[in-house]
Image (cartoon, rainbow, N blue to C red):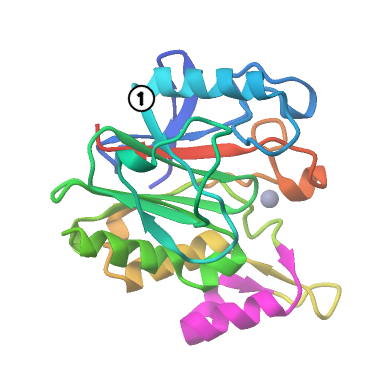
């Protein structure tokens, strides 16, 4: 199952019918930022004009009908934090915690994570009404943040077989070239099954290509999510610099996509 592009109240976003609550993966389109940040930059600390970022958030919240947002301060680890409206912030407000995932059972609260090559994952259990959002770079991926998010949802009453998940646009196996440390870590977490997600070595003997979306999907299945309940974007952020920011493609001068989900 792939994601579909949809104009949501004037904003072009990616969604999946697999997830029946309010959710979206953003693209570069529909905002007011300029230059390297054109146009829907949702990253607060990339060097963009704060007023432009605030306006981009206003548009995203208005399009989705979300009033309160909870943010992450991502550090490529696997902490999934339970949040409530007490934790809601405006863009540029200080955040008193670090984490790469958020989970809640509170209606109306938007959970938001940022990516620009890393893999965004959204989760929803529509039966038990629990949601989560996770940022999975390669370290978070092999650290099984996908499984940790499922665990955090189960603590709030969710059932893995009821969870719907969506893996959004990120750097794909066509472009994610790595040293041996990434395939080694994939093999450590998945065993021989990991070979399915590794290509190489290539022209250089110590370089490999790794499918982080596939690894996250495998870890979701291992955590008990039904394969038919997982949507996966087929878009690569590095192959589509017109549509997405890619950290690798830009060398770091870039905005950020956001992925957001709310029980609405
Ligand atoms: Zn690519």
- Residue toward you, 169 or 76: 76
**Which residue sits at x=57%, y=31%?**
27
In this view, 261 is above or below 77: above
In this view, 188 is above or below 72: below
**Which residue sits at x=41%, y=70%?**
219
Q: In which quarter of the image is residue 109?
A: top left
- Residue toward you, 261 or 95: 95
Number of dots carrying numbers: 1
Q: Quadrant of residue 9?
A: top left
Q: Is mark 1 on a helix, strand or loop?
A: loop
In this view, 180 is above or below 83: below
Query: Which residue position holds label 1?
Result: 67
**Does residue 36 appear to the left or right of 58 in the view shown?**
right
Residue 139 in the image: x percent, y percent?
Answer: 59, 68
**Which residue sits at x=62%, y=73%?**
198
Tell me if mark 1 has few (under 14), some (14-19) or many (20+) residues whose alpha carbon lies within 10 angstroms of its own.
few
């Amino acid at each position: 199952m792939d994601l579909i592009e949809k104009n949501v109240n004037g904003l072009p976003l990616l969604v999946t019918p697999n997830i029946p609550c309010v959710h979206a993966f953003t693209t570069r389109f529909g905002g007011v930022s300029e230059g390297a940040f054109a146009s829907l930059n949702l990253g607060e600390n990339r060097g963009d004009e704060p007023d432009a970022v605030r306006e981009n958030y206003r548009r995203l919240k208005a399009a989705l009908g979300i009033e309160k947002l909870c943010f992450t301060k991502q550090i490529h680890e696997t902490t999934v934090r339970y949040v409530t409206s007490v934790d809601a912030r405006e863009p540029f407000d200080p955040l008193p915690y670090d984490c790469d995932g958020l989970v809640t059972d509170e209606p109306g609260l938007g959970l938001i994570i940022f990516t620009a090559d890393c893999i965004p994952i959204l989760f929803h259990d529509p039966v038990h009404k629990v949601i989560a959002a996770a940022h999975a770079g390669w370290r978070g991926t092999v650290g099984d943040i996908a499984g940790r998010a499922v665990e955090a949802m189960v603590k709030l009453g969710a059932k893995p077989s009821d969870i719907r998940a969506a893996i959004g646009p990120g750097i794909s196996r066509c472009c994610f070239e790595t040293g041996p440390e990434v395939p080694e870590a994939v093999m450590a977490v998945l065993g021989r099954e990991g070979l399915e997600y590794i290509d190489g070595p290539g022209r250089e003997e110590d370089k490999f290509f790794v499918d982080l979306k596939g690894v996250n999907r495998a870890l979701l299945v291992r955590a008990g999510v039904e394969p038919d309940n997982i949507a996966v974007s087929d878009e690569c952020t590095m192959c589509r610099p017109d549509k997405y920011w890619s950290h690798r493609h830009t060398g770091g001068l870039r905005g950020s996509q956001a992925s957001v989900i709310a029980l609405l």
